[in-house]
Image (cartoon, coloured by chain):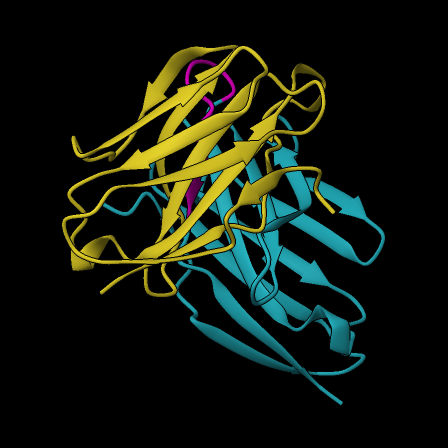
Chain colours: A cyan, B yellow
């Protein structure tokens, strides 16, 4: 039972354009969502998060959108840079109770010069 | 640098053996989490400790156990190892001031031959 899904295993985007990574979840108890970025041989690095009381959170080039009715969130990167090439993981948790993160499978983003 | 330290980086062992993975959390963080990542999949939550006490359990096998010591470092013990236990094992920590944001170490790559 995969509660967090990233349906695109990979995405290729031209440098300077917008990258959009998508994530769907099924558990309505989730109320906090995070995006992590992972380079090879490194641990996941926290990128940006959003609480379920918001529908948008922005941090520099990164914006996360949350659509609670559709149980869908997306990460927008504008403009995309070569250093953004990495695997991106979507994760979800419930603020109350156990705070374990439930991860999606990841999307490998490649930014082409 | 996330501030979370995991040792060793790599571990190669044989089936049936026992290994110990170590994690030092970020300074001041009371919560430690262990995750397993197999075959480029998403991270799977194993177990959480908070200030020395077990807080939550995920899909952790009975052959696996963990503990958190008074200095807050944590160890994950894997015994009677099987080929399928080969994976990346990540430790993460979080503190009260960061909400549900977890900071990850670089991981320990375990190879069971």
Q: From the viewer's perspective, is residue B76 above or below residue B40? A: above
Q: Residue at x 46, y 60 (%)?
A: A106
Q: From the viewer's perspective, is residue A29 above or below residue A75? A: above
Residue A113's spot in the image, x, y percent? 76, 90
Location of residue A12 by image quarter: bottom right
Q: Quadrant of the C terminus of chain B?
A: bottom left
As for residue A69 lying within the magenta part, the answer is no
Outermost residue on the bottom side: it is A113
Residue B50's spot in the image, x, y percent? 49, 14
Give A91 or B3, whichever is nearer the viewer: B3
Give A51 or B48, whichever is nearer the viewer: B48
Location of residue A61 by image quarter: bottom right
Residue bounds of the magenta highlight: A95-103
Residue B88's spot in the image, x, y percent? 40, 54
Give A69 or A23, whichever is nearer the viewer: A23
Tell me, yes or no, if residue B35 can be seen here: yes
Q: From the viewer's perspective, is residue B95 above or below residue B61? A: above
Q: Residue at x 63, y 56 (%)?
A: A75
Tell me, yes or no, if residue A55 can be seen here: no
């Amino acid at each position: 039972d995969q509660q967090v899904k990233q349906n695109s295993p990979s995405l290729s985007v031209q440098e300077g354009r917008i990258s959009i990574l998508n994530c769907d979840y099924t558990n309505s108890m989730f109320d906090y969502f995070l995006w992590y970025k992972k380079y090879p041989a490194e641990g996941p690095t926290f990128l940006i998060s959003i609480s379920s009381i918001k529908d948008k959170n922005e941090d520099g080039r990164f914006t996360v959108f949350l659509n609670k009715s559709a149980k869908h969130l997306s990460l927008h990167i504008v403009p995309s840079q070569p250093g953004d090439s990495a695997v991106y993981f979507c994760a979800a948790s419930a603020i109350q109770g156990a705070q374990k993160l439930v991860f999606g499978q990841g999307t490998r983003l490649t930014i082409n010069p | 640098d996330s501030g979370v330290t995991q040792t060793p980086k790599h571990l190669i062992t044989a089936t049936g053996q026992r290994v110990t993975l170590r994690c030092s959390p970020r300074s001041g963080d009371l919560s430690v989490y262990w995750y397993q990542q197999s075959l480029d999949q998403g991270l799977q939550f194993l177990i959480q400790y908070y200030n020395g006490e077990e807080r939550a359990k995920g899909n952790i096998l009975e052959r696996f156990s963990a503990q958190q010591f008074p200095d807050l470092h944590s160890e994950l013990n894997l015994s009677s190892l099987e080929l399928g236990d080969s994976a990346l094992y990540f430790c993460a920590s979080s503190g009260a001031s960061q909400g549900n944001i977890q900071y990850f170490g670089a991981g320990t790559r375990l190879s069971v031959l």
